[in-house]
């Protein structure tokens, strides 16, 4: 009877394999011409006086005509010198520094959008780093394909130890799902640290971003655009467009962040995203249940071993593809131990989704 547990894997293997097949068809984008459209880059930030100068330095050295872009920094009720730090920076020709007209990241982004001069907008976070061709690559991609939204890659900075490696692997898997579903024209997620969209599109579809939730300025906008047929959302595959961000410095901050991320899951209005989330949760829960039961009834351990192996195959395909594209193949040696820890981690952050909604 316990072998019937393997039936639970069928939807998961089907969905993840389908995403992998789309992922495997992705090819690197190379910009063929210089962009001509004026671009606005919006950075919503809260208490980022230490990290913001690094991002501003990166933006000041972009390989693009300085007359064709502006940087808009929006301080969301910062209690440190974020506003002053940005205002005193002198390396960017077109720099606006604003205070949020309300409270929270979603309103901070709206404040930036309303003050922007460009018809094409790029958003990133103050604690990120970008390469010198970042802006040129995204703007060139928009000029060639003219999508409503562009989802760009995000990568965690290198670190040491199992905790860091686990974060990197988990983040790679999220990036793999993000890229694969977008390439399959059925995107389920994106990252507000590396996102671009048309201003007209934002005003049309940002009316309901569930402002009662701190998180979701990116995914809710994605779903609103996606659920209107004919709107083109594209993944930008380019090493030049990668945004680097820092990993969480301890377990508490990591779990808190992930708790905020999943706190919005119950309000998704995209059926495929909800289906994928439910199938994944059921699959992981069943895996953990089999392991716990196997500790008391050793005959079930064989079922667990088969279940674990079958689930790990599509997971490995996604991670292997993404790790190779990001130059992170060495991380795959941590795959098996991470697979054992992952179900416990997922079930641990679910309660946090109900208590981590009010901080950014």
Image: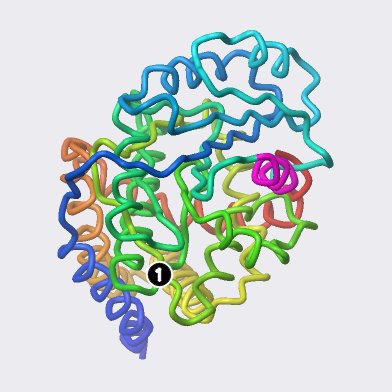
Q: Is residue 74 left or right of residue 296?
A: right
Identified at 20% across, 65% down, the residue is: 313
- Which range of residues does the magenta coloring cover? 106-115
| Residue 88 place in picture, x, y as percent | 64, 8
Nearer to the camera, 190 or 230: 230
| Residue 17 place in picture, x, y as percent | 24, 73
Instruction: State which quarter of the image contains the C terminus.
Output: top right
Instruction: State which quarter of the image contains the N terminus.
Output: bottom left
Give the residue at mark 1: 232
Vertical placement of residue 99 versus 27, above or below: above
Identified at 30% across, 25% down, the residue is: 63
| Residue 70 place in picture, x, y as percent | 53, 30
Type of colouring: rainbow
Quadrant for residue 153, please give it: top left
Quadrant for residue 130, please give it: top left
Nearer to the camera, 148 or 106: 148
Vertical placement of residue 199 versus 291, above or below: above
């Amino acid at each position: 009877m316990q072998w019937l547990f393997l039936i639970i894997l069928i939807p998961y293997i089907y969905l993840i394999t389908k995403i992998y097949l789309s992922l495997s068809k992705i090819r690197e984008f190379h910009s063929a011409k210089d962009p001509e459209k004026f671009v606005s880059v919006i950075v919503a930030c809260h208490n980022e006086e230490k990290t913001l100068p690094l991002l501003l330095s990166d933006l000041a050295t972009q390989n693009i005509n300085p007359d064709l872009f502006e940087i808009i920094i929006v301080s969301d009720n910062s209690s440190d010198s974020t506003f002053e730090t940005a205002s005193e920076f002198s390396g960017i020709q077109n720099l606006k520094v604003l205070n949020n007209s309300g409270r929270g990241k979603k309103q901070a982004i709206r404040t930036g959008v309303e003050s922007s001069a460009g018809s094409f907008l790029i958003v990133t976070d103050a604690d990120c780093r970008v390469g010198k061709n970042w802006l040129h690559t995204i703007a060139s991609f928009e000029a060639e394909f003219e999508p409503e939204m562009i989802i760009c890659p995000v990568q965690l900075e290198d670190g040491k130890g199992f905790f860091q490696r686990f974060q990197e692997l988990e983040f790679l898997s999220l990036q793999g799902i993000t890229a694969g579903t977008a390439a399959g024209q059925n995107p389920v997620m994106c990252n507000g640290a590396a996102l671009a969209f048309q201003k007209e599109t934002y005003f049309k579809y940002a009316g309901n971003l569930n402002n009662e939730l701190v998180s979701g300025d990116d995914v809710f906008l994605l779903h609103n655009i996606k659920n209107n047929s004919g709107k083109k959302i594209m993944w930008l595959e380019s090493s030049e467009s990668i945004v680097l961000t820092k990993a969480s410095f301890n377990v508490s901050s990591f779990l808190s962040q992930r708790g905020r991320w999943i706190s919005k899951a119950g309000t998704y209005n995209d059926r495929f995203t909800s289906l994928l989330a439910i199938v994944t949760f059921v699959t992981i829960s069943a895996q953990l249940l089999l392991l716990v039961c196997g500790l008391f009834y050793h005959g079930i351990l064989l079922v667990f071993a088969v279940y674990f192996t079958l689930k790990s195959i599509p997971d490995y395909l996604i991670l292997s593809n993404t790790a190779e594209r990001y130059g992170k193949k060495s991380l795959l040696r941590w795959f098996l131990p991470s697979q054992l820890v992952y179900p416990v981690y997922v079930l641990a952050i679910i309660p946090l989704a109900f208590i981590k909604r009010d901080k950014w």
